Image (cartoon, rainbow, N blue to C red):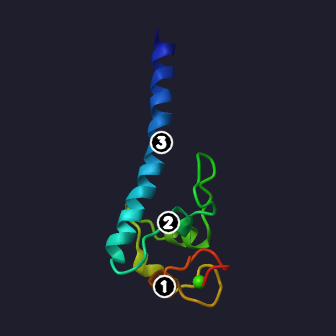
């Protein structure tokens, strides 16, 4: 009985973890929108390598990694990395965000 219950709890935790990370991403997209109300909306590919990442494909691009590094007490500090050029294409993150190009993709500037 205990083993079954432990298995169910583990499964529930795993589901919560996966759902939690997807929710965090959507939450971040919302935060991006409130931080940059005049800028084009963030896409999955703003922070992730894949345009539509599925489970296990959520690798972060250079901008996503820089943004993750600002995480403190569960919050992200967008302003902290605005002046950086995460993808090293010669255009600052904030300029790319305003233009709607991808701050994490050197092919987009
Ligand atoms: Ca750039």
- Judged from the image, the secondary structure of the residue bearing numbered disc 2 is loop
Mark before the other along the chain sequence, 2 or 1? 2
Quadrant hosting residue 32: bottom left
> In x, y percent, where is residue 90?
63, 90
Horizontal relation, residue 89 to residue 74: left or right:
right
- Judged from the image, the secondary structure of the residue bearing numbered disc 1 is helix
Q: Which residue is mark 1?
A: 99
Q: Which mark is residue 54?
A: none
- Judged from the image, the secondary structure of the residue bearing numbered disc 3 is helix
Q: Are marks 3 and 2 in contact (CB under 8 Å)?
A: no
Quadrant hosting residue 19: top left
Q: Which residue is mark 2?
A: 43
Residue at the extreme right: 107
Residue drawn at x 60%, y 84% is 109
Q: Which residue is mark 3?
A: 17
Q: CA distance from mark 1 to mark 3?
A: 34 Å
> In x, y percent, where is residue 100?
49, 79
Q: Dot 2, crowdedness within 10 Å: few (<14), some or many (≥20)?
A: some
Camera-near label (1 vs 3) is 1
Residue drawn at x 67%, y 79% is 107
Mark before the other along the chain sequence, 1 or 3? 3
């Amino acid at each position: 009985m205990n083993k079954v219950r432990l298995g169910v709890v583990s499964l529930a935790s795993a589901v919560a973890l996966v759902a939690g990370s997807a929710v965090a991403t959507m939450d971040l997209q919302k935060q991006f929108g409130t931080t940059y109300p005049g800028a084009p909306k963030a896409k999955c590919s703003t922070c992730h390598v894949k345009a539509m990442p599925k489970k296990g494909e959520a690798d972060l691009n250079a901008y996503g990694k820089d943004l993750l590094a600002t995480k403190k007490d569960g919050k992200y500090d967008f302003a902290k990395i605005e002046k950086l050029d995460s993808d090293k294409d010669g255009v600052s993150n904030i300029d790319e965000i305003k233009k709607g190009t991808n701050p994490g993709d050197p092919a987009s500037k």
